[in-house]
Image: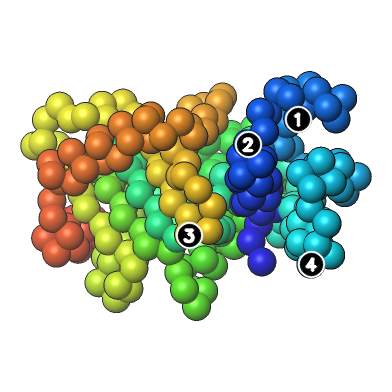
């Protein structure tokens, strides 16, 4: 079973296809049910949970009478309202970041470019602790450890039976900045190299300083792909905001930038050597 966020998108997609197969206009359907057009749009986009009563009214309006079909939709509706595993971490998972954790849990492929930071899925515990403490300077040690536990839990997708394909491009600044000191950085860089060398689903490149200006100057982002819901998601964040892009033209632009970064970066096999060499430079 997928995560609630992904299940809502799947449910919304199926309901949208069902409406289209009846050649019904979304505005007319919403009016017939006494809803605003935006409510139906949010349901079909998977942005809001769907209640059983509303699901039943939609199915009836679309003429769905088969007991099996009704059961399928209602089961999916109920599953999409369940809480994800990350809810156990409370405020360590900010509201807008919960959607990302959900998408990440169900993604089949993740492209990520990080200009100053090792991607979260590839971080060691020591490196992650120093990053979290630096980025959340006012939080208590308990809260830092809770955020750290969440980050380590997210990495469990790498060990599942069918892990996602991950292609990470890391800016040279991220491997040169001594987060936590020499020992922490040497361990971190060797960890990335080991993952890229040992796991066929993980590919790593390094964007060197010598590449000069590039297509994602000042930006970091990820693009996530799924096997059982339409479309993909692009995600980026700043200190105070998190942005999700679902417009396919904009996502195509993110993919184009990523492919340009691939061309400007050290190729995978040589990137592994670069990571190990820089680890040696830390003197550990």
CA–CA distance between discs 1 and 2? 11 Å
Q: Residue at x 21, y 29 (%)?
A: 215
**For mark 4, does the 10 Å Cα neighbourhood hold few (<14), some (14 to 19), or many (20 or more) residues?**
few
Q: Residue at x 27, y 61 (%)?
A: 203
Q: Nearer the viewer, mark 1 or mark 2?
A: 2
Q: Please state the horizontal and vertical placement of residue 103, each as a whole percent of the image.
A: 56, 50
CA–CA distance between discs 4 and 3? 24 Å
Going from the N terminus, do you reach mark 2 or mark 3 first?
2
Q: Please state the horizontal and vertical placement of residue 160, each as a whole percent of the image.
A: 51, 74
The numbered disc on residue 112 is: none
Which quadrant of the figure contains the C terminus?
bottom left
Q: Which residue is mark 3?
A: 227
Going from the N terminus, do you reach mark 1 or mark 2 first?
2
Which quadrant of the figure contains the N terminus?
bottom right
Q: Going by the picture, which residue comes out furthest to the left?
A: 210
Q: Is residue 160 above or below residue 37?
A: below
Specify whether 70 is left or right of 194: right
Specify whether 192 is left or right of 64: left
Q: Nearer the viewer, mark 2 or mark 3?
A: 2
Q: Please state the horizontal and vertical placement of residue 171, each as a whole percent of the image.
A: 25, 42
CA–CA distance between discs 1 and 3? 29 Å
**For mark 1, does the 10 Å Cα neighbourhood hold few (<14), some (14 to 19), or many (20 or more) residues?**
some
Q: Which residue is mark 2?
A: 23
Going from the N terminus, do you reach mark 4 or mark 1 first?
1
Q: Is residue 23 above or below residue 77?
A: above
Q: Which residue is mark 4?
A: 68
Say if mark 1 contacts mark 2, CB within 8 Å: no
**For mark 3, does the 10 Å Cα neighbourhood hold few (<14), some (14 to 19), or many (20 or more) residues?**
few
Specify whether 275 is left or right of 242: left
Where disc 3 sits, the SS reads loop
Q: Is residue 138 above or below residue 88?
A: above
Where disc 4 sits, the SS reads helix
């Amino acid at each position: 079973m997928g995560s609630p966020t992904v299940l809502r998108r799947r449910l919304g997609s199926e309901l949208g296809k069902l409406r289209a197969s009846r050649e019904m206009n979304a505005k007319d359907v919403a009016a017939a049910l006494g809803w605003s057009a935006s409510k139906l749009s949010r349901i079909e986009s998977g942005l809001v949970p769907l209640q059983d009563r509303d699901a039943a009214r939609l199915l009836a309006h679309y003429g769905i009478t088969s007991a099996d079909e009704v059961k399928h939709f209602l089961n999916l509706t109920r599953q999409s309202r369940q809480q994800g595993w990350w809810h156990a971490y409370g405020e360590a998972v900010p509201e807008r970041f919960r959607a990302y954790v959900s998408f990440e849990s169900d993604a089949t492929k993740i492209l990520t470019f990080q200009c100053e930071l090792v991607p979260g899925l590839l971080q060691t515990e020591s490196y992650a602790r120093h990053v979290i403490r630096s980025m959340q300077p006012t939080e208590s040690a308990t809260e830092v450890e809770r955020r750290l536990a969440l980050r380590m839990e997210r990495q469990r997708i790498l060990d599942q039976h069918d892990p996602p394909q991950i292609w990470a491009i890391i800016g040279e600044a991220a491997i040169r900045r001594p987060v936590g000191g020499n020992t922490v950085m040497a361990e971190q860089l060797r960890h990335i190299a080991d993952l890229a060398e040992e796991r066929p689903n993980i590919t790593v490149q390094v964007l060197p300083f010598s590449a000069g200006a590039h297509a994602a100057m000042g930006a970091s982002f990820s693009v996530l792909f799924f096997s059982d819901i339409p479309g993909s998601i692009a995600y980026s964040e700043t200190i105070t905001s998190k942005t999700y892009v679902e417009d396919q033209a904009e996502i195509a632009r993110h993919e184009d930038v990523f492919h340009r970064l691939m061309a400007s970066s050290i190729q995978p096999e040589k990137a592994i050597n670069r990571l190990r060499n820089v680890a040696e430079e830390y003197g550990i």
